Amino acid sequence: MNGVKTWYVRDATGNVMSIYTKGESTVNNGSLSRTAANLYGSSRLGINAVKVNVEDGNVLPGVNMTGLGSGININFSRGEKFFELSNHLGNVLSTVSDRRVGISTDGILVDHYEPTMSSSQEYYPFGMLMPGRSSVVTGGSYRYGFNGKENDNEVKGEGNEQDYGMRVYDPRVGKFLSVDPLTKSYPELTPYQFASNTPIQGIDLDGEEVKFVTYYHATQNSSPLYKVETNYGITGMVNWATIEIHKYRTIDAQGNYHYEARPSPFINHENVTTSSSGHSPGKFTLDDARIGLNAVFYKYGADRAAIVEKMYRLETSHFKSGGYKHTGTGGMEAKDGHENDAPYYGWDKSIFQKYPEFTPTGIWLAYEGPGMSGKGGNAQVTDHPKSFVILPSVTAGMMLKADYIERYNGHYERWAGLTPSVQENYKKTLSGITPQIVRELTIEYDKQQQQQQSTLTRNKN
C-alpha cells in the first residue's frame, strides 16, 4: 500500500514469527526492516517491536574485553518489547512493556517495580471496541486484539477489521465479509456468522469453525458450574452462584475428560489426534468411524460390525452430521430430567461401569434432526434444543451399540423401538445401506489370514 511492502515469516504450523516492511519512510528511511518479532511460550506472549534494519551493511566496531576476548557493543533500550494480557477467549485486554517503573514510599529507596502499561481496551461481545474504554499510552497501538487476531487498522480504523486467516471480520457488525467455506455443513447458520453466533462461550478459530472455551458442566448446590478453557490448553473451573454466561447449557469438549465432583482448579489437557485413538469431541471424522468399527470387528465379528456401521450411517448421514462430529453418536439423548446428572445423564450406569473408558464427557445442545421418519427419532421438539450426550470417542458409541445388540441376542431392531412395525421398517431400511468400511476391514482381515497361512505352510515345509 502506497509503495510499502510487508512480508510475514511463519513457522511450519502457520504462527507468525517475524514481520518485515520495506518502503516505510518512518522506519529506517524505508530500508527493508524487521518491524516485529512475535514472542512465544506455549502461545503468543507479545511482540519485540525493535526496528532492525536488515539492509544495514555497516559492521559494528569490535572491543576487547579483559579475560573474555573481543566482542561488539550493542545499545539496549527498554520499552520496545510488549507483552499481552488476555482473557480466556484470547481477547487482548491490555499490554505492558518491558520498561519498569520504580516505586518508592519514602522518596529514597525503591520498594518495588511496576510495569508500564502500553495499551488497554475493552470489547463488546462480538469484538467492537467500547468507545471511551480504550487507550494507547506508549508504543503505539498493539497489532493483535479481539480473539487474539491481527487488526488491519489501515482499512476501517482502529480495531474495525481483523484477519482470521480464512476470512476477514468486521467486529462492528459481528459478521465476516465473505461466505463461510463450511456453509454446506451448517445450513442452520448464516454464511456470514461469527463463532456460530456464540461470542461469549466460544471463539472463531480461523473464519471456518467455532471453538467453545466456556461451557456448562453441571449444577452444584443449585448453582451453575461452568468450565473455562484458555487458548493455551489450560482449563479451570468457575463456580459462582450469580454467573450466567449463555442462554442454553452447552458443552463442546475439545478433549477426553473425566470429571470429578470437585476437580482440581487446573486440569492439564491436550487434544487427542493420534491415529490409534482418534480425534476428540467436536472434531470426529470418518477416520474415527474406521477406528471404532475396527474395534467392534475384532471383538464381535464382521456381521456385528456391519450392523453397527449401518446403524451409524443411518443416524449420522454417513458420518457427516453435526451430532456425529460433536458427540460421536447419532443422537444419544440425556434422559428427561437428568440433563444435569453428570456423568451418566440418566443412562444405565452399569453400562459405563463395565466400560469406564466410555464414560460421557458432557452435554451438547442442538435441535433434533428429522431422522429417517422425517419427524425425529423420538418426540420431535422444535422450540428449544435437546440435550445430547457427548462420548469421549466414536469407538465408545459403537462399542455400546454392539454391547446393546449382544444383550438382546442380536436383535438390533430393538434400537428403533418395541413395536413390530417400527422394527420391521428399521430392518428394511438398514438392508439398503452398504457397510463399506466393514467390507474393507473384511478384505484386509482375509489377506492377513492368507499371509499367516502361507507363512505357516512354508515353515512346515
Image (cartoon, rainbow, N blue to C red):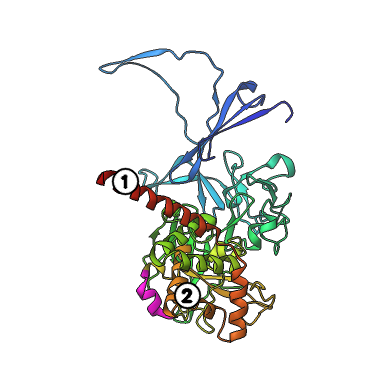
Residue tagged 2: 218
Whether residues under marks 1 and 2 lie with C-beta atoms below 8 angstroms apart, the answer is: no
Q: Is residue 448 left or right of residue 437?
A: left
Measuring from the top left, give residue 66's x and y in whole percent.
27, 16
Residue tagged 1: 455
Measuring from the top left, give residue 338's x and y in whole percent.
50, 82
Residue 253's disc number? none
Q: Dot 1, crowdedness within 10 Å: few (<14), some or many (≥20)?
A: few
Measuring from the top left, give residue 254's x and y in whole percent.
49, 59
Classify mark 2: helix, strand or loop. strand
Tell me, yes or no, if residue 279 can be seen here.
Answer: no
In the image, residue 142 sits, relative to residue 423, either above or below, namely: above
The span from disc 1 to disc 2 (Cα, nearest Å) is 56 Å
What residue appears at the point 68 percent right and 47 percent down from the top-left corner? 167
What residue appears at the point 73 percent right and 51 percent down from the top-left corner? 179
Measuring from the top left, give residue 83's x and y in whole percent.
49, 44
Tell me, yes or no, if residue 458 can be seen here.
Answer: yes
- Identify the amino acid type marked 1: Thr
Q: Dot 2, crowdedness within 10 Å: few (<14), some or many (≥20)?
A: many
Classify mark 1: helix, strand or loop. helix
Q: Is residue 22 left or right of residue 290?
A: right
Assign the magenta stretch its main secondary structure. helix
**In the rendered image, which quarter contains the N terminus?**
top right
* Residue found farthest to the bottom: 419
- Identify the amino acid type marked 2: Ala
Mark 2 or mark 1, which is nearer the start of the sequence?
2
* Residues rendered magenta in the picture: 348-356
